[in-house]
Amino acid sequence: MDQKVVVNFYPKCPQPNLTLGLKRHTDPGTITLLLQDQVGGLQATRDGGNTWTTVQPLKGAFVVNLGDHGHYLSNGRFKNADHQAVVNSNHSRLSIATFQNSALEAIMYPLKIREGEKSMLDEPITFIETYKRKMSKDLEVARLKKLAKEEQLQDLEKAKLEAKPMEEIFALRLLSWPFFA
Ligand SMILES: O=C(O)CCC(=O)C(=O)O
Ligand SMILES: [Fe+2]
């Protein structure tokens, strides 16, 4: 197996509604043991991010999360926890996560498939390969989001321009000449 310990420090943030400490994700490994301080900020969702439940800190307790590897091993019977961390305007926050992962080159496949069920994996695959696929999917989603945002901004600029009186557009053109002529 492979084990990693990550310490997350979230500085306090004056406008917590404008950002996230850690964006929505599932952990890639088998099981995560998470120790959080009393500030709170870990949230989980069961409906794809529409609603969020805060995981209240409990003194001396670990939060135990199932990751993707655990999800695949059980052929989806046990769910990988979909979660995020928000920030706080009054307090900084610390959490320590220990990820129990499979060895990177270990082959994974569902341990048991019940009658009438289909395997979640088309073929046995190494743990590292599922991780790489997940990362490239995440990068592609981020790229598309960025593109959509840029297009939205361009449309907004266009709409603003269309709403301006002719003299103003003319003045703007003169100002930015020769780049915009
Ligand atoms: O800080 C937290 O509560 C969550 C940390 C986490 O999800 C992670 O490190 O993967
Ligand atoms: Fe996580």
Image (cartoon, rainbow, N blue to C red):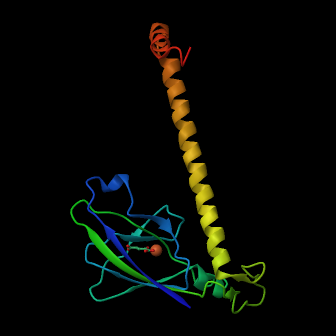
Left or right, 8 with respect to 14, comes to right
In this view of the protein, can residue 74 be seen by the observer? no
In this view of the protein, can residue 27 be seen by the observer? yes
Give the vertical position of 15 relative to 167 (above or below): below
Residue lying at 67% horizontally and 84% vertically, measured from the top left: 75
Residue lying at 62% horizontally and 56% vertically, measured from the top left: 140
Q: Quadrant of residue 107?
A: bottom right
Left or right, 71 with respect to 34, comes to right
In this view of the protein, which residue sits in the foreground, 48 or 127? 127
Give the vertical position of 64 relative to 133 (above or below): below
Residue extending farthest top: 167
Q: Quadrant of residue 70?
A: bottom right
Left or right, 74 with respect to 155, comes to right
Instruction: Report the quarter where the N terminus lies.
Output: bottom right
Percent x, y for residue 134?
62, 69
Percent x, y for residue 129?
67, 76
